[in-house]
Amino acid sequence: MTEKKEQLFQDKIDAGLKIEPKDWMPDKYRKHLIRQISQHAHSEIIGMQPEGNWITRAPSLRAKMVLIAKVQDEAGHGLYLYSATETLGITRSELIEQLQTGKAKYSSIFNYPTLSWADMGAIGWLVDGAAIVNQQSLRRTSYGPYSRAMIRICKEESFHQRQGYEIMSKMSNGTPEQQEMAQDSLNRWWWPALMMFGPHDSDSAHTSNAMKWKIKRGTNDDLRQLFVDRTVKQADLIGLEIPDPDLKWNPESKHYDFGEIDWEEFWEVVNGNGFCNKERINNHTNAHTEGNWVREAALAYAEKTQNGDLK
Amino acid sequence: MSEKKIPAWEVFIQPKTGASFQHAGNVHATDKEMALQNARELYTRRQEGTCIWVVKTENIVSSSPEDQASFFDPADDKVYRYPAFFKVSKKAKGL
Ligand SMILES: [Fe+2]
Ligand SMILES: [Fe+2]
């Protein structure tokens, strides 16, 4: 019986149809989705912190408004994705608990500190840029609610990358100090951005089922290559140098070859030993606990007024 | 942690005046007013709509995908509901 259901399920996937919340799905598919979508949601939410760090110190009112709007978008992305995860039968409070206890992960990139204003540029350009490559491919993921969330998110992301690139190009055309800041920022963010795509496909634990079920639509290495190819030219254009001596155009493959990622650093940060792992989770937990009375008051008010009917 | 659950609401947006409302996603909110405000903040930050409906998720009734075939079966064999079923002379205009 289950076998027949699994076959029907796979047929549907192979035919390019979407799976919807009430459809039958293998348990492993459900679990894989919960892990992947919630990790994605947590990344959007924790990802607000490194940029939130600079809102009060933005160099102009325009820059401040843009950064606030961008960070607000990221909150929205987190919420779209929590909604999508909840359709799989897990509650919002369970998800938040998994984040706060470390049972669920988020993208390691957000455990790096933001040291200068140029980092707002590098994050928008590189971190959102890498996220966009991944998210564009996920618009075609097999799970309906996840795919719809990705389509919405991709529409909003392109402004994020452009505003980052604008900051970088302004600074690299600015004073020598500003140029230096921009280059320093690229130096610090380049490799972590490449790590965002995850381990090599040959070392990735989750790739095969995820591809068979069309949860993932591109492999880690392919997506990473796409990102490198796009970004090298953008760096050239604003006179910044990508910190990789092995980076070279390969006329045969028609792609850029690039150096090996420091996987030791990658796993160190994944396993909690990055610069900001503790701070990020502490901030989240504190904000959540401090907001408790608001949620309680709102629930009490709703009860008293019967769901907002004041009369 | 407040373990009393904050309910979910489904959000429907009318993209422009006169258009049909479309499902956009959901929000969590303790009452109607908060649901509308959260929906506005979450789904219409770029003028995506002219009007929003919110309805508690628990109040939505859905047909079940397992019964899809039998549930929609009555519409299966009624080709006469489509204009192409009827043969009329090509000379007849405005039909
Ligand atoms: Fe985002
Ligand atoms: Fe973004």
Image (cartoon, grey):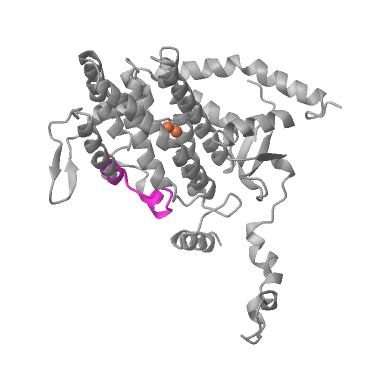
Compared across the picture, whether A28 is left or right of A275 comes to right
Q: Image point 40% across, 37% down: which residue?
A: A158
The image quadrant where one finds the C terminus of chain A is top right
- Front position in the image: B91 or A233: B91
Question: Which residue does the image show at 44% across and 47% down from the upper left?
Answer: A139
A59 lies above or below A76: above
Q: Name the quadrant containing residue A258.
A: top left
Residue B6 appears in the figure: no
Task: Please indicate whether residue B40 sits to the left or right of residue A224 in the image.
Answer: right
- In the rendered image, residue B52 lying in the magenta stretch gets the answer no
Q: Residue at x 49, y 35 (%)?
A: A38
| Direction right: furthest residue | A311
Q: How many marks?
A: 0
Q: Quadrant of ligand 1?
A: top left
Q: Residue at x 45, y 16 (%)?
A: A61
The image quarter in which residue B87 lies: bottom right
Q: Mainly helix, strand or loop, the magenta region? A: helix
Depth check: B78 or A168 in front? A168
Range of magenta residues: A208-225
Picture coordinates of residue A53, whole percent (x, y) = 42, 16
Q: Quadrant of the N terminus of chain A?
A: bottom right
Residue A203 percent coordinates (x, y): 28, 41
Locate residue A88, reporting x and y percent. 57, 43
Image position of A284 (left or right of B34) = left
In the image, is residue A309 above or below residue A174?
Answer: below
- Residue B95 vertical placement versus A140 (above, below): below
Residue A27 drawn at (x, y percent): 52, 48
The answer to whether residue A195 of the structure is visible from this angle is yes
Image quadrant assignment for residue A67: top left
